[in-house]
Amino acid sequence: MRFVVAALLAALCASAEADEGVFENGGALLKYITGTEIDAQLRPWYSGYAFGFVVGVADTQSGLRNPSTGYCFDKPPGVTRGQMVKVVKDHLDQHAETLHLSAESLVQAALEEAYPCKKQIQR
């Protein structure tokens, strides 16, 4: 657990790629997932950060329509965290023109494309 916390803190502190007003953009998230342009010793930290980022968005947003992005997705039963990360990676690879946008919105877009909302949770 301490390793994960340390990895997240290191990734947050080291992220200089993000656009103004955005903690992470799609380009940074794709680098973290793939390990591209990241020192070999830091790859596990960034990989863990990216994994946690995708899972965090999936856990907090599943079944809810995000009012600022309009995206909505439903995590299907049995889908693994690894499958969700792969869905996001593939989406980022296929939509390079959007990598400047917020990582959160791109994760939502990827998950909506793969797992569209069937019903929204009412709050």
Image: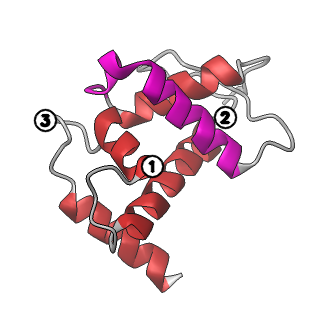
| Residue that numbered label 1 is attached to | 33
Secondary-structure class at tag 3: loop
Secondary-structure class at tag 2: loop
- Residue 23 is drawn in which quadrant? top left
What's the magenta bit mostly, secondary-structure-wise? helix
Q: Is residue 94 magenta?
A: yes
**Nearer the viewer's eye, disc 3 or disc 1?**
1
| Residue that numbered label 2 is attached to | 62
Quadrant of image for the N terminus: bottom right
Q: Give the extent of the magenta segment.
A: 81-101
| Residue that numbered label 3 is attached to | 20
Q: Residue at x 30, y 62 (%)?
A: 11
Measuring from the top left, give residue 84's x and y in whole percent: 65, 40
The answer to whether marks 1 and 2 mark residues whose Cβ atoms lie closer than 8 Å is no
Secondary-structure class at tag 1: helix
Where 99 falls versus 86 (above or below)? above
Quadrant of image for the C terminus: top right
Q: Is residue 67 visible?
A: yes
Closer to the chain start, of discs 3 and 2, is: 3
Q: Residue at x 59, y 43 (%)?
A: 85
Which three-letter amino acid code belongs to the residue tagged 2?
Answer: Ser
Marks 1 and 2, how far apart at CA: 21 Å
Q: How dense is the environment of label 3, judged by Cα within 10 Å: few (below 14), some, or many (20 and up)?
A: few
- Residue 96 is drawn in which quadrant? top left
Q: State left or right for residue 23 relative to residue 105.
A: left
Residue 9, numbered label:
none
Closer to the chain start, of discs 3 and 1, is: 3
